[in-house]
Amino acid sequence: MASKIELQTEFNVGLEALWNAVTKDKFDVLRKAAPHLMTDSQVLEGDGGLGTLVSINIGDAAAHIPPFKEKTVEFDEAGHFVSFQGIEGGFLKLGFTSYKVSFKLDDLEENKTLVKTTINYELDEEIDGTTQVVEDFTNIIGEYLKALTSYLENSA
């Protein structure tokens, strides 16, 4: 059965800086901002925009999550909207049958951005610990955004 989680968070970071950190510069910024979240990443195909396929190894913050591949399936530069879909490994080996994480960034005022996060997912019907795997997934997304924005706030 399909499920959805929606979150809204305000960050004290400018829209364009955060947009670049979530899209084009995400791996460079994440390596600097949160080495505990990601030990390795590679762009397997694409240029960072629509259709880009990446491979990611999660760090010590969630060492139980296997390496995974994600694809950028929606990318609207002007509207500041992007979606990443799990393709292989990671949470797909932990009970998710599919997932897509979307970020919509809205400018609230100078150096203040609203991030609307939508997580669409389906779980294997036979999975034990459904609540925990969804909580882990949501926490990783939250840690990812906090690490990016903290780094950007301190770099400004």
Image: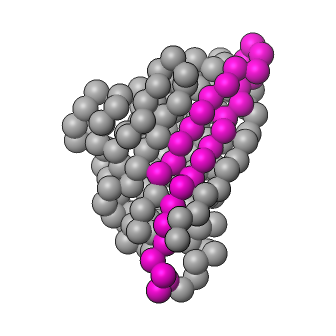
Q: Specify the segment rendered in magenta.
A: 100-127
- Asked whether residue 61 is in view, the answer is no
Please say which color scheme the image uses. one colour
- Side of 87 where 129 appears, left or right: right
Relative to 110, say whether 141 is above or below: below
| Residue 106 placement (x, y as % from top left) | 67, 25
- Side of 96 where 136 appears, left or right: right
Where on the picture, by quarter, is residue 94?
A: bottom left
Task: Give the total number of marks visible in the rendering.
Answer: 0
Q: Residue furthest top?
A: 110
**Where, quadrant-wise, is the C terminus in this rendering?**
top right
Q: Residue furthest left?
A: 45
The residue positioned 61% from the left and 74% from the top of the image is 132
Q: Nearer the viewer, residue 146 or 84?
A: 84
- Asked whether residue 105 is in view, the answer is yes
Magenta: main secondary structure equals strand
The residue positioned 71% from the left and 30% from the top of the image is 114
The residue positioned 41% from the left and 26% from the top of the image is 24
| Residue 69 placement (x, y as % from top left) | 32, 53
| Residue 133 placement (x, y as % from top left) | 56, 71
Where on the picture, by quarter, is residue 42?
A: top left
Q: Is residue 107 magenta?
A: yes
The residue positioned 37% from the left and 39% from the top of the image is 72
| Residue 140 placement (x, y as % from top left) | 57, 55
Relative to 39, say whether 91 is above or below: below
Q: Residue furthest front?
A: 1
Relative to 65, say whether 74 is above or below: above
Relative to 40, say whether 98 is above or below: below
- Side of 47 where 147 appears, left or right: right
